[in-house]
Image: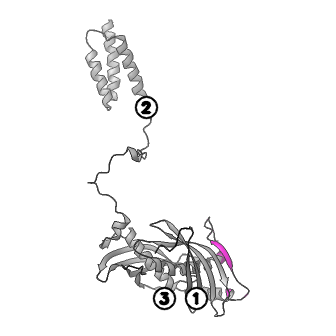
C-alpha cells in the first residue's frame, strides 16, 4: 500500500468521525479543510498532527455531560427583554383590572381575605376560627362614589374545637373606598349553613375554667419557631386570631394582604365585668410588602357577648418608624 493511499485512509477515518459529530459548525469547517487537502499528494505532517489534536478534543467535548437545563446565564449576560412578548402582570396592574378576575390571582385572593377577616370578627371564638379555602369566582368594578367593588364566590374552612371542620360556601361584596385618608373596606357577606356550625359547649367550658380569679394565664410565642403549640393554649391563639382580624379588617386596602403569623404574648387581666380580659401582642404579615408589623391589643370575650377589641396600639419595631403602614 502506497504512502498516498495510506494517508487517504487516515483522512477518511478522521472525516468519518467528524461527520458523526457534524452538528457543530466548527466540525464542518474542519471537514472542508480536510477535503481540500486530499488528492494525490499526502498532507504535511503538521496537518495530520493538527487534525489528530482536533479529533481528540472533539471526542472529549462529545463525551462531556451537557449542563443542566435549569442553569441560566447571569442577569448581566442575558439579552434585553423582547417587548413584543407578553410579560406577567404586576400586582399594581392586576389591582386596576375590572371585569372578571382570575380567581387564583392576587386581587381576588386579597378581597376574599378581607371578607374572611370580617367573618372571623362576627363569628370567631376560642373554639372557632375560619380560614380561606378557595376563591371560585371573582369580578371587580369601579363605583361612581369612588372606589372599587369586588364580588366574590369563595369557600372557607371552619375549625371548631381545633380540628378541621366542614367547608362553607360564601359570597361577598368588598368595597375598597378611595379617599385621601385611609378608610376601612366595607364588607357585605353571606355564608351557607353558618348557623349549623357552633362550639357552644366547648366555649362554655373554657369560659368557666378561666373566669376564676386564680386561673390567670400568660404565654409567649404561639406557635413557637418550630410551629408547636400546646393544646391548652390553642383557644388563646384562636382568640388572638379573631381579635387580630379586627385590626386586619380596619387596616386592609387594595395594596395589602394581611395575616396573623404569631401571638407573641398573651396575658390575662383581671376583669369585674364577667369577661375574659386578654392583653395581646400579635405579629401581622403583609404578603405584598413582606412587612411584619407588631400590634398590642386588649380584647374581651364571653360566650354571650363574643369577642370585642377595646384598644389597639401599633408598636414600631424600628427607631425611625413613626406611624402604621396605613
Is the N terminus in the top left, top right, bottom left or bottom right quadrant? Answer: top left
For the record, the magenta segment spans 210-232
Quarter residue 5 falls in: top left
Near mark 1 (Cα within 10 A), the count class, few <14, some 14-19 or many ≥20, is some
Q: Of the residues under marks 3 and 1, which one precedes in the sequence?
A: 3
Check the image and name the residue furthest to the top.
2
In the image, residue 105 sits, relative to residue 196, either above or below, namely above
Nearer to me, 157 or 89: 89
Residue 170, numbered label? none
Point out residue 81 in the picture as x, y percentages from the top left corner. Answer: 32, 51
The residue shown at (32%, 58%) is 87
Q: In the structure shown, which secondary structural element does the residue marked by tag 2 occupy?
A: helix
Q: Badge 1 is on which residue?
A: 200
Point out residue 109 in the picture as x, y percentages from the top left corner. Answer: 41, 72
User: Alpha-carbon distance for marks 3 and 1?
Assistant: 12 Å
Point out residue 295 in the picture as x, y percentages from the top left corner. Answer: 56, 76
Quarter residue 201 falls in: bottom right
User: Alpha-carbon distance for marks 2 and 1?
Assistant: 72 Å
Q: Of the residues under marks 2 and 3, which one precedes in the sequence?
A: 2
Q: Badge 2 is on which residue?
A: 63
The residue shown at (34%, 25%) is 18
Mark 1 and mark 2 in contact (Cβ < 8 Å)?
no
Residue 195, numbered label? 3
- Residue 220 visible (yes or no): yes
Q: Is residue 222 magenta?
A: yes
Quarter residue 306 falls in: bottom right
Point out residue 93 in the picture as x, y percentages from the top left corner. Answer: 33, 66
Q: Is residue 107 magenta?
A: no
User: Alpha-carbon distance for marks 2 and 3?
Assistant: 70 Å
Near mark 2 (Cα within 10 A), the count class, few <14, some 14-19 or many ≥20, is few
Near mark 3 (Cα within 10 A), the count class, few <14, some 14-19 or many ≥20, is few
Amino acid at each position: 500500500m502506497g504512502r498516498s493511499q495510506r494517508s487517504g485512509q487516515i483522512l477518511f477515518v478522521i472525516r468519518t468521525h467528524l461527520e458523526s459529530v457534524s452538528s457543530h459548525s466548527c466540525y464542518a469547517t474542519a471537514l472542508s479543510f480536510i477535503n481540500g487537502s486530499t488528492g494525490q499528494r499526502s498532507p504535511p505532517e503538521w496537518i495530520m498532527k493538527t487534525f489528530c489534536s482536533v479529533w481528540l478534543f472533539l471526542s472529549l467535548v462529545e463525551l462531556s455531560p451537557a449542563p443542566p437545563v435549569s442553569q441560566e446565564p447571569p442577569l448581566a449576560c442575558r439579552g434585553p427583554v423582547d417587548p413584543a412578548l407578553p410579560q406577567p402582570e404586576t400586582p399594581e396592574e392586576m389591582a386596576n383590572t375590572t371585569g372578571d378576575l382570575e380567581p387564583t390571582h392576587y386581587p381576588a385572593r386579597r378581597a376574599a381575605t378581607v371578607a374572611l377577616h370580617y367573618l372571623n370578627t362576627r363569628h370567631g371564638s376560642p373554639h372557632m376560627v375560619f380560614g380561606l379555602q378557595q376563591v371560585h369566582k371573582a369580578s371587580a368594578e369601579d363605583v361612581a362614589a369612588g372606589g372599587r367593588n369586588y364580588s366574590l364566590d369563595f369557600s372557607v374552612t371552619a375549625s371548631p374545637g381545633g380540628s378541621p371542620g366542614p367547608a362553607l360556601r360564601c359570597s361577598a361584596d368588598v368595597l375598597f373606598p378611595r379617599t385621601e385618608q385611609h378608610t376601612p373596606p366595607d364588607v357585605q357577606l353571606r355564608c351557607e349553613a353558618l348557623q349549623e356550625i357552633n362550639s357552644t359547649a366547648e366555649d362554655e367550658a373554657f369560659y368557666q375554667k378561666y373566669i376564676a380569679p386564680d386561673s390567670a394565664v400568660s404565654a409567649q410565642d404561639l406557635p413557637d419557631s418550630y410551629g408547636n403549640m400546646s393544646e391548652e393554649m390553642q383557644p388563646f391563639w384562636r382568640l388572638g386570631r379573631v381579635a387580630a382580624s379586627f385590626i386586619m379588617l380596619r387596616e386592609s386596602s387594595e395594596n395589602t394582604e394581611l395575616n396573623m403569623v404569631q401571638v407573641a404574648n398573651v396575658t390575662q387581666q383581671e376583669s369585674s365585668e364577667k369577661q375574659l380580659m386578654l392583653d395581646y401582642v400579635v405579629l401581622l404579615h403583609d404578603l405584598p410588602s413582606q412587612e411584619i408589623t407588631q400590634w398590642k391589643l386588649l380584647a374581651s370575650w364571653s360566650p354571650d357577648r363574643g369577642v370585642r377589641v377595646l384598644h389597639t396600639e401599633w408598636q414600631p419595631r424600628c427607631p425611625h418608624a413613626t406611624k402604621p403602614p396605613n
